Structure formats: C-alpha cells, structure tokens
Amino acid sequence: MPTIVGGRYELDRMEVNLRRKGSFFTSLREDLRETFLPEEPFRRRPDEAECHWSTLMLKCLVPILEWGSKYNLTKFQCDLLAGFTVAVLAVPQGISYARLAYLHPVIGLYSSFIPPLIYAIFGTSTNVAVGNTAAVSLFLASAIGAEVSPVDRPELYTHLLFTAAFFTGLFQAALGIFRLGILVEFFSHSTITGFMGGTAVIVIMQQLKGMLGLKHFTTNTDLWRWESAALGTCLITMLLLNSHVSAKLRRLFWLPVLAPLLVVVLGGLFAYVVHAEDHGIPTVGTLNKGLNPLSVSLLKFESKYFKLLLKSAFVSGFLALSEGIAVGRSLASMKNEQIDGNKEMIAFGLMNVVGACFSCYLTTGPFSKSAVNFHAGSKTPFSNVVMSLSVMAVLLFLAPLFRYTPLVALSAIIIVAMLRLIDYEKVLRLWKVDKFDFLICIAAFFGVIVFSMTAGLLASVGLSTLRTLLYVARPSTCRLGNIAGTEMYCDGQQYPNSISYPDILILKLGSPIYFASSGYLRERIMRWIEEEETMQYLILDMGGVTSIDSDGIGMLVELHKHVERRGIKIVLTNPRIGVGEKLKVSKYVDLIGKERVFLSVKEAVDVCRDNLQQYSKEEV
Amino acid sequence: MPTIVGGRYELDRMEVNLRRKGSFFTSLREDLRETFLPEEPFRRRPDEAECHWSTLMLKCLVPILEWGSKYNLTKFQCDLLAGFTVAVLAVPQGISYARLAYLHPVIGLYSSFIPPLIYAIFGTSTNVAVGNTAAVSLFLASAIGAEVSPVDRPELYTHLLFTAAFFTGLFQAALGIFRLGILVEFFSHSTITGFMGGTAVIVIMQQLKGMLGLKHFTTNTDLWRWESAALGTCLITMLLLNSHVSAKLRRLFWLPVLAPLLVVVLGGLFAYVVHAEDHGIPTVGTLNKGLNPLSVSLLKFESKYFKLLLKSAFVSGFLALSEGIAVGRSLASMKNEQIDGNKEMIAFGLMNVVGACFSCYLTTGPFSKSAVNFHAGSKTPFSNVVMSLSVMAVLLFLAPLFRYTPLVALSAIIIVAMLRLIDYEKVLRLWKVDKFDFLICIAAFFGVIVFSMTAGLLASVGLSTLRTLLYVARPSTCRLGNIAGTEMYCDGQQYPNSISYPDILILKLGSPIYFASSGYLRERIMRWIEEEETMQYLILDMGGVTSIDSDGIGMLVELHKHVERRGIKIVLTNPRIGVGEKLKVSKYVDLIGKERVFLSVKEAVDVCRDNLQQYSKEEV
C-alpha cells in the first residue's frame, strides 16, 4: 500500500532502526566488555551450570584446579615423557642462554627449576614449556650491561638482573590483572619476525666472534685460537647435519632434541680427555651442586637503578610476553585449543616475581622448548613440573659434570638455534602479500642490527601504529554502481561494468568518520560532486560506517549545507546501530529529513529515480 | 544456464573481481596521492586547459596571481571596508595580546603590519584576517617565560619570542611543503573546544588578578586598588552590554567591532583627565612612533636555547595552525568556498618567518578578527593589506596617543573576548552526541587549568589517538540476518526480526583486519561458532573490510583450519578490491576454494541452502 511522504507517493518502506536498545550505561558496559573481556572469562560453560560463583572464580584464577580435577594416568604418562624430553633440551639451553646474558651458567639451570613450577599452577597453555630465551637474554645484557659492566662488577650485575626479572614480573602480572592484553596485540607478527631475525644475526656474530677468539672484528692483534674454532666448526656441522637428517626423516623427530645434550656431552668428554683448557679451549668451569639459593635480600630497590630497571622491565616484559603468548596461541591452535592471553600474562608475571626471589632471571615460554613439549605430546601444564624436577635432579647430582663443557659447544648450540629464527621465507611471503608488513619487518630487522634492539622494536611498532592511524585518517570511500541483473551496488572501480545513473551519485563511505578523517572525506566527496554536472541526489551508503564522532557529524552537516545550495539532496542508506543513533541525537536525521533515510541502496535509488521521473513529467 | 562446480549444480554466478588493475607501483602511487594530495592541487580546472604547466605551478604556489588577475573595483570596495573594520579591532587587540605575552604593546601593532602583507600574497582564504591570538600568546609566555623571566631579562625574552616565531614559521612551512596537513587533522574540534575553554579560564583569572591589583590570590598583604577595579568593572560591563545589545539587534552588528576601540579611547580620555597614574590606575606608557625595526640580528640561534625554542615552536606551531586552518575552513564553508590546508600552512609559515625578522611575534588567523573580516564582507585576501596599511598609519602617526590607555581597559577587552571562547553549549552537545568526545574535551579543559597548556593538549590528543587505536583494535563485527521480503542481510541486533538459518552462520566482519585486531576477531568469531550447535557453513561478509594485513590473513587461515576440523565450511562474500587481491596472492582463496567466494550474501546463502538440501536428500 503506497503511503504519502512529503506530498509524493512512495512505496511501502522497510523501517530503518536508529535506536540502540538500553541506556548509555548499558552500551558503555557492552563496549568495555568487548574491549577488555573479549573472551568472556567468567561465562559458565554448560557443565559448570551448578557451580557456586566463588568456585568458578577460583577455577578461573587458578587453572590447575580446572585441569587438575580431570587429571588421569594417561595424561600423566604423556606429560612425563614430554617433560623428560624438554629437560634434555633445557639443561644445555639454560647454560647457553645464561652465558649469553653474561650470567653464571648455573643461573640458567636455576631458571628452569622454579618458574616452571609456578607456571604449572597458573598457566593455561598445555604446550608452553618455561625457560629463558636468547632475545630477552641478549636484550637484558645490553640494557643493564650498558650501565653496570658484567665483567667489572659481576655481582651487582647479577643482582640487577634478578631485580629486573622481579619488576618485569610485576609489570606482566599487572597487565594481565588490568586486562591490558590488548597492548601486546600491538606487536604484529611482522615486527616479531624482523626483530627475531635481527637478534639472531647479532647473537650469531657475537658467538662466532667468541668462537674464533676475536675481541673485535677489526683489529688484527687478537689471538687466533685455531683449536677452539676447529672444535666449534665440528660441533656446528654436527648439529646442522642432525637437523637436516631429522627434517628428511620424520620418525627421527627426537634427534634435534637430543642433539644439544649430545654436543655438550661429546664436547665435555673431548675437553676432559685432551685437557682442553691447556690448548686454548675455555670451558664452563666450576658448577656447584645445590638448588637455587634465596635471592630476595639481593634485589636492588635503590633509587639509583630504579629508572634503568623500569625501562628494561618495560621492554623485556613486552618482548617476553609477546613471544610467550604468540607461541602459546599458535601451538594451541594446532590442537584446536584456546589459551587465555590475560591469564597467561598473570602466570608469566607470577613465575618471574617468584623466580626473582630464587636466583632466576627473566623466563617466558620460548618457541624451541615449547615446540619440543608440543611434539613430545604434553597434555597439561604438568609437563613443566616433570621438566622442573628433572632439572632439579641435575642441579642436585650432575651439575659438577658440566664443568668440562667447552664454551664453543654452548656457542654452537646457540648459533644453530638462532639460525632457525631467521625466517627468510616468511619475509619473502610478506613482500608478496603485503608490502607495508614487509617494511615493518625490515625496519625491525635492520633497526636491531644497525642501532639497538630497542630502536628496532620502536621503529617497527611505530610504523605499525602509523599504518593504523593512516587507515583511520584515510578511510577508503568509493563510488557505487549497480551490478546488472541484481540488487547489489558495488565499487565502480572494482566492477567497471556496473551501472551508474547521471542524476544520482552513490558513495559508500569508509569507516570510521572521525576527527582525523572528516577533513579528508569532505575534500574527497566534494571532488566527486564537482565532477558531476547534472547531479540531483547524493546517496551516502553508511552500511560500512561502524563509528562516527562529533567532528564526523559536523562534516556531514557542512556537506549537507554545501550541496543544498546547489540543489542537491542527501539521502542516507543503512546507518548502523551506534551511528544511526548519533545521527538522530545530533538532529542530523531531522536536518535532511527522516524520509530520506533508507535501509538499502536499491530502495533509495528506486525512490530517487521515481521522484526524478515525476519531476520531469511535471516539468513537461 | 547451470554450471557444474565441485560436482554440484549451481546457479550462474556473478563473477567476483579479485584483481586490482595495474601494478604494485600504480597502486602505491594512488595510495600516496590519496594520503598526501587528497585535494589534487595540480589538477587543471576547465578554464585552465590551455595554460602552460609552469604558469599553473606558479599560480598554485602564489595564490595572489590567481585571484589578482580577476581583481576589480567592486571587490576592492568590499575589501577596503572589511580591512578598515578589522583594523579598528586589530589595534586594541594587538596591544592587549602583546601584554598577555609579556611583550611591549607596540610589538602587538608590529605583528598586525608585516605578517598580513605576506599572507595576502600566499594565503588562499578570503576570510582569514591575520593577527595574534590569546592562546598562543599565553602559551609562549608560559613556555619561554619558564626559562627566561620576562620581568628580569625583558630584552632576551623578547628576542627569544621573535626566534620562536621564526622557528614556528619554518616548521609550519615545512609541514605545508611536505604535505603533512594530515598531522593537523589530529587535533579534533573537541580538543580545540576544551583547550580554548581552559585557556580562556586561565587568562580571565590572570587578568582579573591584575585588575584587582593582586599578585597572588592567597596572600592578604596585596595592595587592593579600588580605582583600578572600579574602572575595570565599568568597562567590562560596557563591553558585555554591548555584546548583549548587538546580539539582540542584528543591524547593530558593527557595535562589538567598535567596542574595544571605544573602550580604549574612553579609558584613555578618562585616564588623561583624572591623571589616572596618580590614583593607582597604571597605563600602557610611552609608545614611540615608527614602523617595525629589523630584528634579524636579534634572533637567538645559540645552542643554549635551541631545545627550548624547538619545543615551543612545535607546540605553538600546531596550535596556531589548527586555529588558523579551522577558522579558515569554517568561514569558507559558509561562503561555499574551499581553502587549501597545505597552502595555508605555507602562507602562515612564511608570514611568521618574515615577521620574525621585523620584530613580530607569532601570528595566525584568529577567530575574532577573521569573523569580523567575514561579516564586513571581505572578498579576497586584499582586506589584509588594507588592515595592514591602517595599522601602519597608526604606527606612524597615532601610536603616542595610546600611552594613556589604562591597563584595565586592555584586561577588560581580553576578558570579554575570552568569555566568548568558553563554549559551554558545544560541550553540552558533545555530551549528548558523543560521550568519548566529551571526555576528550574535558581532558583538555581541566588539563590546561590544573596542569599546563601542553599537558592539557597532550592528554586530549592522547585520548583521541587512543580512541583511534581502539577502533582499529576492536572492529565491530556482527551477525547478519535476512530482512524478510528483501535480499538484504543486516545486523541481527539492530533488526531483531531478521531471519537466520540454523545451519548457516553469517558474520559481517569489521574493518580493518590488522595485527591489532586479528586476535580479537578470532576470539569473537570462535565464540559465535561455539554458540552454534548444528552449523555447517560460516559465511564471512567481507564487504565492509577495506584493509587487511598479513596477520589478518594468518587469522583467517587459522580460522579455516579450526572450523574445517569441525566439518564447517567457510564462504566469503564481496571481498573489496585490495583485500581480495591479498587473499588471492596469499593463496587463501585457493585454500577455501575459489568456488566459495561470492559477490553477495544472498547468493552465498542460496548456494549453501541448496547444497544443504541436496545433502539431506542424499542422506535420505
């Protein structure tokens, strides 16, 4: 049945809903929940319908209660195997990375004992295996080492590293508690790829230097120790061959896990037999038996180091979290599981705070160990307990045996591990798929190599943020045309055969219409209008606009005034829920007339064409 | 004609275009142009088709060549009247604002002489009248005054203010030359409203303090000068009455323009007659005749002040530009004209660089003078020349007469001008229309009052940027349903009566799918999938997605793997031009199958339902 609107007959129209259900506070709560609790941590699953809320809360905060209650023998067997396997890697890697951070090797072992126990209680990932990482070790060494030399004042330096872990832990836990996981999302994969690659290059160069006995690459006066270099080359070749073979033969997947320990054992035996120290092959040196000593009293809270520690904690906290969470996420997705980013942050934070009190430095969920844990079939975070207890056994009984380990063996382990971090295939893929992501990656890579780790990270994150801001400042707007034979209106540039009408200009506005983009949108729309000669209707398709602010509405008002003077009428289609409401509250809908708001472009075009025909008939 | 795809009969399909025309570099050039040259400054208008490109270029760089060639007597008469009118306001305002910046009053007059001449050559706005503004004067006084006291070292302080103007000019011109107008867009109207309001409150309190003869509000020992306060109160009342009357009676629009001069003249006469200085009413004091002295040699380029000057120039440059360009834009839109933001920046920059060499401090296009210029009917930037020459006449012949002007008269002018800047109606409107904009405005307002002008500005711009980043991090995604009787699919929350199918979940993805949002989108989509029991098809409507990066594609791949394990098929609809291309290059389209990409949701739903029916028939 035709209804009369503004003196003209029109078709029965679909009603456009401009109102949001509920008050301002309802929608504010909704928005805040989407921002900070996107995964609804407190929702009840069907099987928990009967539980008291306090039980649910406790289960939510201490995940071990959740999975612990369903633990069984099968899972235990799997975790046992996985835990042992990871421990085999944990020992040599712990010693190696501690040396990378200029710490006593035994601290690397300490760090594989206490933190995994804490993680097992609070962590949600069934795959993450806790330990140190090369990137964070190197970063801490360069950041703290710049102010307190690890060579001249080793004790103070070590205590500062404990304190840095303490602060980092507090920072990480705070991020998790205040649900700021959103911040970690600002490290893109492109940034991480570039950063890891750059770090790997630096670590490799540093280790090669050490292996060749050079202090500086440029001076010729350095002592060339051929024995050390020869042994190192042998061990690296062995490790590389090993990776190569295991990559070819899938069933030898355990080879690369065992390899580092093999290198340490073989290297140690060799050094013991030939009295390596006498031949210019330095070894790790004395490692005393015994568990982590308490280090609470050693933490340095003096104001002198406060700024340095806060700065280091900030960067290393983000670094550690982004590696740990990314690793947890990608492994979880392979098993079709979910991890909770904010809970993970709290778990990482707590394990570092506690670790720092027991002579551990910064730990996270490193890729290498976690991948091994995953492939060895871990079922719950209990595999971390198994690993931890294995490392404890080493600390209690086997530690002194590692004194003969040649330093070059550790270098070899580090170098081969780092080679895997240089993911040139991914960089190539970035170039192919997204040039801007490639730029972000390359900025991190060269920033780290040429300037510093912080500089590379900042440059890369800066570029990512710039991209985000540019996206908002230049929302892509296009001219629509009708796809023949359908009711669809699509981008005229994408579908050049689409049909446009001489009297009607249809624009699909980009989103969001914010202060940063309203100036641009005005210019862009004006230009389209200027290009048209005979235009009578300007249809703005708002279907893609999910947000608008008061400057955006101001721009629409200005546009309305501008086109009205030229006799052009503005028509809106499909305003979305929040946007339509604002257009109504700000009286913009009243300004252009409620009858000029339509649900679909098709409907709007039909009515406009109808009016134009009636008009031309009346003219005649 | 039905075609066979994947072994099933399907309807003839609309072809989806995934390819962009042209190479990577074509699209890069296109993107750069949209970002930095959105208004196409070098395009030829129809009447310029014959011109040589160098003529066009010159006209583009020196706008006076453009409008000068079309200048005529009618325009001249209008500009003459407008120029004189503005000059009447320029003289008292110049003196007042110079005092606000702790400068000698004559510098305010100098600043209304040289810069307008330069602006007339390079400016594009026909409405902007050049002069000092209260906000920038106050900011410079607080920023430079914090390091060099204007009371103890007035000469050095003055020279530093010239140098600050010089640096600001360079900075502004550079922004214009490098087409970075986009940066100024990051000051929203909400920020400006709050900032101006806060500044006005501070200025009013400061002036009241001066008027009452108080040094500090808290000490009682200050000298209470009742004469000064009484005169000030009279003059303020006069000015306010004046505004009130002219607001009521439209034809007295010239009253507020004349009022400040009237206040200065009456105040001066009064002071002369009663020998005000002897009764505790301080006056301006000696003003020598003569034009601007050269100040090139006075500019302080010493490294000692370099950092201070750069910092001040950065903030004041942005402040001055955002006021000048916003004023120019809003006045232009009332006349249906366009101004060119980047050219305006160059014009403002050049006038400040030249001004700084002739004893002028920072100028821009203030709202009060420009509005008067507009209402008095200026037609071209030539009205600035008229104003400039009028001020020159004052400098040459009338300056000494102003020596009797009581300082309270200047305070009264400033206070009344500032009252107009507190736009509480706009703040109320912001609260009603957009709560976040209200917050941005209030942050600037209280930031300026409680902390400092820079702090207020930073807090407000920070909040605006946060909003932008949050928009990108949490793109609004919704579940679509069919509006009965149409081919449209709309937000089920907005249209609760829309129809959904049990086996098919249709989601409209928010834009952009970037590193910052891909994690959230994954969680959000997974939650929707979990809620569904019998789902077989997941239709992702990409029509609103205007940009995607490699992390976003990674998320889609992960999602595909996840749902495939549950036997759910992903279907894409309407990928936009750049997005479709990336999905193709990254092999995502191959992964889900090219036959699962549709142009419209309707088509996708039809095919899915068709397949489901065939499947259930085969089951039977």
Image (cartoon, coloured by chain):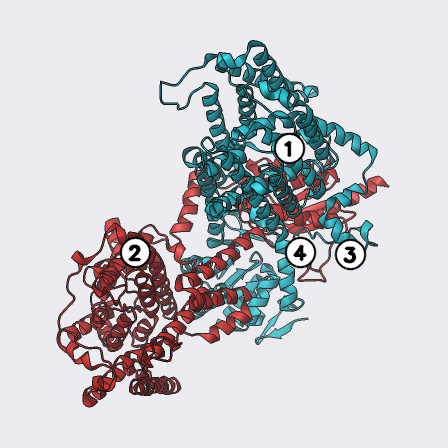
Chain colours: A cyan, B red
Mark 2 or 4, which is nearer the eye? 2
Per the model, the C-alpha gap separating discs 1 and 2 is 53 Å
| Most foreground residue, A556 or A248 | A248
Per the model, the C-alpha gap separating discs 2 and 4 is 62 Å
Is residue A517 shown left or right of residue A75? left
Which amino acid type corresponds to the residue marked 3 in the rendered image? Trp
| Most foreground residue, A265 or B253 | A265
| Most foreground residue, B134 or B25 | B134
Per the model, the C-alpha gap separating discs 3 and 1 is 35 Å
Q: Are marks 3 and 2 in contact (CB under 8 Å)?
A: no
For mark 4, what is the residue?
Answer: B487
Q: Are marks 1 and 2 in contact (CB under 8 Å)?
A: no
For mark 1, what is the residue?
Answer: A112
For mark 3, what is the residue?
Answer: A53
Of marks 2 and 4, which one's residue comes earlier in the chain?
2
Q: Secondary structure at mark 3?
A: helix
Query: Is the residue marked by circle 4 packed among few (<14), some (14-19), or many (20+) residues within 10 Å?
Result: some
Which amino acid type corresponds to the residue marked 1 in the rendered image? Ser
> What chain letter is assigned to the residue under label 2?
B
Q: Are marks 2 and 4 in contact (CB under 8 Å)?
A: no
Query: Is the residue marked by circle 3 packed among few (<14), some (14-19), or many (20+) residues within 10 Å?
Result: few
